[in-house]
Image: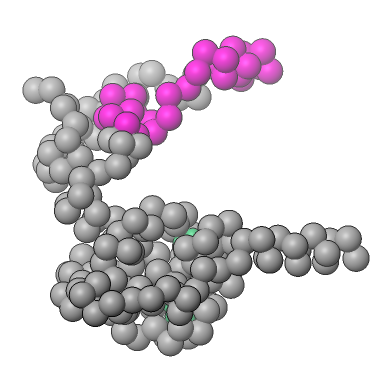
């Protein structure tokens, strides 16, 4: 009983901001946006029926105002400026794809939007920071001394990786980043 009440309150407070509530002027609609999304591998957003299944199963949409169905609708309408401020909010878990009756993969759409953002507006600072960590440490997040000490205390190896293989893996990562132009795209210096 208590669970039901809590759920209802949560949905009410995190209500979807419907696109229908926002006035849209014709100048905001970029007719080339749908083509650009397809070119970046995001698929054809026009196949979306706006059924809302994706939002219903999306763990991120539960917590944010920008629901995935709404993002797709903005893409259908060519609202490029609006939509480019939202694409980072996705865990790329592909649950939406499993539940889509139209065969659309919203996760791929989000990845395509990220490509467009990075190319047109530049990478967000957290992406640069994570990329630097991956290139120099071989992992996205640096492990703090506190965690290293805690690992030792509970009987684990101090480091959760084998140093013998790590430097080779980092070299390989840098080679891939250079070969694909990822370093230049993100703006990180990998050295010689
Ligand atoms: S892939 Fe993204 S949009 Fe789809 S369900 Fe997962 S978090 Fe939501
Ligand atoms: S589940 Fe598929 S058809 Fe339904 S709103 Fe999401 S993307 Fe569109």
What span is colored magenta in the figure? 129-156
- The residue sitting at 51% across, 68% down in the picture is 17
Residue 64 in sight here: yes
Residue sitting farthest toward the right:
1
Q: For residue 138, which quarter of the picture?
A: top left
- Image x and y of residue 98, in percent: 50, 74
Is 130 colored magenta in this rendering?
Answer: yes
Q: Position of residue 159 (x, y in %)?
A: 50, 19
Residue 114's spot in the image, x, y percent? 29, 55
Question: Does 173 sit left or right of 83 as displayed?
Answer: left
Residue 100 visible, this orientation: no
Eyeballing the image, is 40 above or below 142?
A: below
Q: Is residue 78 above or below residue 118?
A: below
Q: Front-most of 154 and 44? A: 44
- Which image quadrant for residue 24? bottom left
Image point 16% across, 75% down: which residue? 32
Q: Residue furthest left?
A: 192
């Amino acid at each position: 009983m208590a669970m039901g009440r809590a759920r209802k309150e949560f949905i009410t407070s995190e209500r979807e901001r419907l696109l229908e509530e926002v006035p849209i002027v014709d100048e905001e609609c970029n007719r080339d946006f749908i083509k650009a999304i397809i070119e970046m591998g995001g698929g054809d957003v026009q196949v979306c029926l706006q059924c809302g299944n994706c939002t219903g199963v999306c763990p991120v949409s539960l917590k944010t105002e920008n629901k995935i169905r709404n993002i797709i609708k903005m893409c259908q309408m060519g609202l490029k400026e609006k939509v480019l401020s939202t694409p980072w909010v996705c865990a790329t878990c592909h649950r939406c794809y499993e539940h889509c009756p139209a065969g659309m993969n919203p996760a791929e759409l989000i990845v395509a939007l990220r490509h467009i953002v990075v190319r047109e507006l530049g990478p967000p600072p957290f992406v640069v920071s994570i990329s630097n960590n991956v290139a120099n440490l071989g992992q996205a997040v640096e492990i703090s001394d506190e965690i290293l000490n805690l690992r030792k205390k509970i009987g684990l190896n101090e480091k959760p990786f084998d140093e013998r293989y790590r430097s080779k893996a980092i070299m390989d990562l840098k080679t891939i980043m250079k070969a694909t132009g990822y370093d230049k795209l993100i703006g990180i210096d990998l050295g010689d």
